[in-house]
Image (cartoon, rainbow, N blue to C red):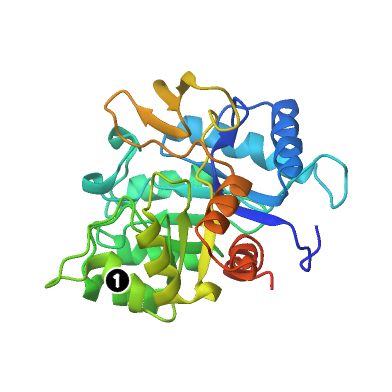
Amino acid sequence: MSEGAAGYLDLHIHGAFGIDVLTAAPAELDRLALGLAARGVEAFLPTLVPMSLPALRDAVARLSGWMASRTAADGRGARPLGLHFEGPFVSPVRAGALHRECLLDGADDRKVDAFFSAAGAPPGRPMVTLAPEIPGGEDLVREFVRRGFVVAIGHTEANVPELERAAALGARHMTHFGNAMKPFHHREAGPVGWGLVADAVTVDVIADGHHLSPEMLRLVFRAKGAGRVALISDAVPAAGGPDGDYSVWGERLTLKDGCVRNARGNLAGSGALLDECAARLASLGFPPADVRGSATDVPRRILGLA
């Protein structure tokens, strides 16, 4: 894929069509990529959730091998541009559907070293979502930036001073804005209020009709400007499939009417793919150029491709 390509780029996707990037064999990953290409997605970041470090090592090695086998215009569908690590260095208070038992303490040097050993040097343009307020969080921002990662803030309880310091260190993006982060309060802006007014920071949103209300989507685009908002799917393996129960990440997820919930009734990723999220924005009256840009140009700029 060339940097000037006009297809959709999904920065955050765990799978679709019954295929889980955590466990999929290369042939299944090809099926996922072809299915995404049929939906207008030209590139994507396979997204990993917190897991045991041996499982992480295996997943990264398998995905890296598959990525290395891909070439531009190879006819095998959407092109993986890098891996997105959603955690494990996030707030347990805002873990959401992420498994708390797999989160790591950023102040424990042995665990941090073990994580980087398991993650290795992933190919392409890797991305990480972390919470800068956890113990050792600011040192983690420095280290991930040093290693060439795009550092995003998410699953976080951070206050404004903590967010400002993280941004100064290189964390200038926010993951699924408004979700899995401390809500806005009129005396403590927190991640939501800060993200809306921090001009140097980009955000991404899930426009699936469940994660954010239409009013919130309009507020984000008006406050940030369309050039600083990326559209993501956060799709899980149930996306693109029929309603029903799915076994994902060792638990049961239920897809119903486009909404994915776990056994506790909490949102667990999205059942919508990126083309469906774009269509929903369009149905809400967003300008076509803004909709397309949020799914194409903005994510490329976030990855440093444009």
User: In the rendered view of the protein, which quadrant contains the N terminus?
Assistant: bottom right
Residue reaching furthest to the right: 74
Q: Is residue 137 left or right of residue 26?
A: left
Q: Nearer the viewer, residue 269 or 272?
A: 272
Splitting the image into 4 quarters, where does residue 124 fall? bottom right
- Where residue 214 sits in the image (x, y, percent)? 40, 57
**Residue 170 visible:** no
Identified at 76% across, 37% down, the residue is 34
Above or below, 248 against 81 in this view is above
Is residue 300 rendered to the left or right of residue 30?
left
The residue closer to the viewer here, 173 or 295, is: 295
* 193 or 85, nearer to the observer: 193
Q: What residue is at 30 percent from the left and 76 percent from the top?
A: 165
Which residue corresponds to the image point at 75% horizontal and 27% vertical from the top-left?
27
Residue denoted by label 1: 163
Q: Is residue 100 above or below residue 147?
A: above
- Residue at the image point whose x is 54% and y is 65% from the top: 286
Residue 21 x/y as whole percent = 59, 34
Amino acid on which the number 1 mark rests in the picture: Leu
Q: Where residue 82 sits in the image (x, y, percent)? A: 63, 52
